[in-house]
Amino acid sequence: MQIVPKAPTVKNPPEQFTGDVWLDAIASPQQEGDRMTVVKVRFVPGARTAWHSHARGQTLHVTEGVALLGSRDGTVVEALPGQTIYTPPGEEHWHGATPDDYMEHLAMIESADDPSTTTTWLEHVSDDDYRRP
Ligand code: MN
């Protein structure tokens, strides 16, 4: 076994996020055939992902603040620290902080057969779509 060296915290690209969102890698594929990626993601107040989907689904686990999670049917749900959210493969969604507080979650995904298709990024979330439930 080994302790994995800590990679620097990186800011997520503005093409895929509204507001500042910082990412720390926790687990990455190590061996041929590995698919698991786990990241810690920190959103400043009002920050959120763009619309997107994951080829093999995604599990999120909220660790701080209140997470907002939006679906294409217009629903926005809240998730609290300790709660886990699962998004099925291909389902378009977004996740982010509330307007007034930081939010942190763990994000767990498995790579697609073609890793470049693991996450499909779409348009930014409008202010109308981003609203508290
Ligand atoms: Mn997602």
Image (tube, rainbow, N blue to C red):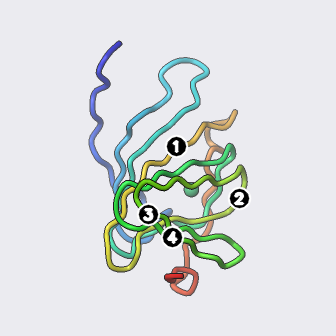
Of residue 78 and residue 37, the one placed in the foreground of this image is: 78
> Distance from label 2 to label 4 (Cα)?
18 Å
Q: Residue at x 28, y 27 (%)?
A: 5
For mark 1, what is the residue? 108
> Distance from label 1 to label 3 (Cα)?
17 Å
127 relative position to 112: left or right = left
Q: Determine which of the numbered discs, if any, sits on residue 91 in the image.
A: 2
Residue 13 at x, y percent in the picture: 42, 59
Disc 2 under 8 Å from ligand 1? The reply is no
Q: Secondary structure at mark 4?
A: strand
Q: Residues within 10 Å of mark 3 (few under 14, many from 20)?
A: some
> Distance from label 2 to label 1 (Cα)?
15 Å
Q: Determine which of the numbered discs, if any, sits on residue 80 in the image.
A: 3
State which tag comes first along the sequence, 2 or 1.
2
Eye-nearest disc, 2 or 4 = 4
Q: Determine which of the numbered discs, if any, sits on residue 78 in the image.
A: 4
Q: Amino acid at mark 2?
A: Glu
Residue 63 at x, y percent in the picture: 37, 54
